Image (spheres, rainbow, N blue to C red):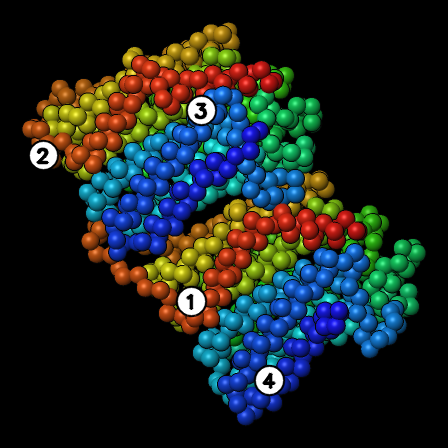
Amino acid sequence: MTHSTLPLFALLPSLVGAILILLTGERHRNLREFWTLAASVSKFAIIWSMLPMVLEGKVLGVEVLEIVPGVGLELKVDAFGLIFALLASGLWIVVSLYSIGYMRGLKEHAQTRYFFCFAMAIFGAVGVALAGNLLTLYLFYEILTVATFPLVAHKETEEAMRAGRKYLAYLLTGATLVLFSIVLTFSLTGTLEFTPGGFLSGTASKAILSLLFVTYILGFGSKAAVMPILEWLPSAMVAPTPVSALLHAVAVVKAGVFCVLRVILYVFGPKLLTDLGLWLPLAFFVSVTVIGANLLALAQDHLKRRLAFSTINNLSVIILGAALLSHDAVRGALLHIPFHGFMKITLFMCAGAIYVKTRQDLISTMDGVGRQMPFTMGAFALASAGLCGIPPVCGFISKWYLCLGAIEAKEVFFLGVFILSALLDAAYFFPIVYAAFFKPPKHDQIKPHFDDASPWLLVPIGITALGSMVLGLFPNLSLRFFDLAGQVMKAVLAGG
Amino acid sequence: MGIMAQLPALIVVTPLLLAFLVYLVGIFRPRLSYPLVLLGTSLSFIFSLGILYQVLHSSAPLSYHLGGWEPPWGIEYRIDHLNALVLAAVAAVAWLVVLFAKGLVDREIELQKQPHLYTLLLLEITGLFGITVTGDMFNLYVLLEIASFSAYALIAMGGRGAAFAAFRYVIFGTIGACAYLLSVGYLYILSGSLNMADLKGIIPGLLHSKALLVGFAFMVMGVGIKMGIFPLHSWLPDAYTLAPSAVAALLAPLFTKVGAYVIVRVTYGVFPLSFSVKDYPAAEALGWLAIGGVIFGCVMALAQRDLKRMLCYLIVAEMGYILMGVATGNRTGITGAVLHIVNDAFMMACLFTVVGAIHYVRGTRDLDDLKYLHIQMPLTSAVLVVGGLAVVGIPPLCGFFSKWYLILGAVEARRWGMVAVLLLSSLLNAIVFFRLIERAYLEVQPAEAFVPNGGTHLKVKLDSLPKGMIFSLLLLASALLFLGLFSGTIVKEIIYPFVNGL
């Protein structure tokens, strides 16, 4: 591990930014928004600056405090953490622009609280990405959970409050299970340090390790919305759209998936999971979610809820890929984390733009909206094609590797799961695109002439839509997701 | 050395003498009494830091012989890492609460009576410090009674019903005191000694004696009543709810914690570790009481509408946590118990002061009257969030770290029931506090009434509280954060030396 204080500085901008936002408040709105943008840009720049060193194979780390004797508050940047950190901080810039347009466009209340919590949530998410051991991870995981609660309940309607309570009930219960697992791990091994290929091997009987695995997966699974603990996510769609976009497509739920993958690859390790035979039950468990979520998505008329179920599907696809433990499947899963983030955030931002412009959130009333908002719906069509795995959008690349991985693992069943899930994706995305462009407007809010959303909303949508396309054509461009994923794959599968 | 060597006596004598002075001055100049109290607590806080410094830099415990009589005949004040830590925490919290108390006392107590209250407050603090520093079983009894009698009188100064609650407390407290005194009697008859360090050497030779067991049981029962262990807690919610707010903010966090300190000291510092864990299933029994207490406290807290009463039940639960750590009987669990004594003193002080501040501004403590709190009292609401999250156990606030050691200790002891209750109680606490946070920060509106009001933001002004109150609230909240961040250091430097010596 190379000692470096860069990871600490990568965390600070959002924390400092959050405090400045709170102090500035409603009196100087432009200054407040400036803090958000300044924090997001500097955060991304610092994280990006670590990329070359990590690509050389270095692990940058710093231990700040010894919070429990033997376990430090430790930040460690490896390739896996960097993938998630780059994704979360990069998209934060885009969504900040979008948030400003969205919140001002709708004249939302309590914007200071909103931007403060947003910054704190990113602080938590990037902290999860850069955490070097389980206790540090748990610390940021809880910060993320708590900071997101006011965002879910933002509207303060009965429905929003219920969604907020539900969110807390699911996630805090999950966190409790996680805490139990971490304590048990510590009492078994005396260490919590992430190690490529795992560190639990040979520390306890098979039964105890299996129990531990179950509590870990259920605990972190609550945030990753695996079936049957997913109900909070569709309910949380009552939050303002930028929240759904960044937190419920990228930061929060991806943090859940990230933690599950950390446990699979860095705590248990592929070898131990194969020895215990635990990967197969996990794969079946998440396959149910993969297919089930997509079937449920078909039945949703509320656009954001449909997107939420699609998110649930994709999160489980990632876990399934990691559970297969073959080279290509792990690579595919790792690539799907950022790629899905780019595509899904585009879709959510489109849904938000439609809402700001026409106040429609039901799919059945959106007929003909493509004529009014061609740019928005064009981006929507592009991103949804990507999620179905159509080249040249980036979803194709990750799904390609996932399918290759299923073949490599000689698991035809799970290959079928991947393909069926892609087909179902098409079945619920394309009718939206078709109706938007080819059906005449039904609702009087939807105008037959060109009247697209404001540039504040369109520019971020354009960036992420083009981004998904560029990542599909050149998956290794500038952010180097492909190399990073390869590096993780080698380290993890060799380490076990 | 000079004054440094006298600190163990000074920390008790200073508030004691000032108590008399406050009373005398108060007869002529009632307004002068508060500055004297503040002076007393500030001095003792400085003294406690001095003692902590000395303990950390010396190899043996500090030993102070009162009147120059050699122990075990004379009274010895004996301070090792455990007392030094608890003493510093108690002194710090007492100082912060006294800093906070001025406004509340002015509001609730008429000027002529204030010197009485302040006198008793100083006597109370004297008793608490004394219990913490003394190394003599009988001297501990005396100081326990000084603290208790001051507490009875202080509580009786509250509003309607306080006298009755105080009377109930007197009955319970006296039974507890009797039990403790009996236990001291048993130990004295068996061993011929009252000095704790001396007893620690003698007791291993008496383990066959049934009388020793009876003495131990009386001890736990007596202290248990004083600290409000479930099911001996029933005096606690009434007494602390009806007491004047400033008194409750001092007594509720501190008296119970000092009691918890005595339990730790007696079960592991006077009796050998193996006695409490292996020879008799004391730890086992205490464990079940603790489990009961935690569940009972959390559930009852959920049922309360009065914020202060809610906190009182939470204290019953928190005492359960500490007792659990004691009952695990392993070093990790005891570490958790000691750390929780410190953390909980600060957490409860923080929450009681928050409730005091709300009562000060709004004149109500009802759960449903928290609406728009974040606009009227932004700082207080923020401190409420910090305190609440600390109790729930959200890292990096301090409550998480004591829970960490407690759960780890319970896992090591293979007491899965305890593990389950520790985890479950965090969730119950989360319900308690998110209910408050929700009411303070979010206004529930029916769906159709929702109008985005981006233009009309209510003006946020800082809380209209006296400066001392604001200062104390902010210090308490930041203490919760720093105790959490530096808990590793506290555990390593202060608690491990004590625990490893068992």
Count the labels in the image: 4
Instruction: Name the residue carrying label 1.
Output: B358
Q: For marks 2 and 3, give the one nearer the viewer.
A: 3
Do we see residue B413 in this rendering? yes
C-alpha span from label 3 to label 4: 69 Å
Given the image, on which type of amino acid does mark 2 rest? Asp
Q: For marks 1 and 2, give the one nearer the viewer.
A: 1
Looking at the picture, does residue B306 appear above or below residue A460? below
Q: Tell me which corner region of the image, top left, top right, bottom left or bottom right, holds residue B192.
A: bottom right
Residue A98 or residue B121, whichever sits in front: A98
Instruction: Name the residue carrying label 3.
Output: A52
Q: Where is residue B400 in the image (x, y as percent from the top left)?
A: 57, 48
Where disc 1 sits, the SS reads helix
Given the image, on which type of amino acid does mark 4 rest? Val
Question: Horizontally, is B148 left or right of B450 in the view?
Answer: right
Q: Are marks 2 and 3 in contact (CB under 8 Å)?
A: no
Q: For marks 4 and 2, give the one nearer the viewer.
A: 4
Q: Residues within 10 Å of mark 3 (few under 14, many from 20)?
A: few
Given the image, on which type of amino acid does mark 1 rest? Ile
Where disc 3 sits, the SS reads helix
User: Upstream in the sequence, badge 2 or badge 3?
Assistant: 3
Where disc 4 sits, the SS reads helix
Instruction: Name the residue carrying label 4.
Output: B22
Do we see residue A314 in this rendering? no
Give me the residue at 59% from left, 69% from top: B94
- Chain of the residue under the numbered disc 1 shown in the image: B
C-alpha span from label 1 to label 4: 29 Å
Question: Horizontally, is A421 left or right of A446 in the view?
Answer: right
Q: Where is residue A201 in the image (x, y as percent from the top left)?
A: 66, 23
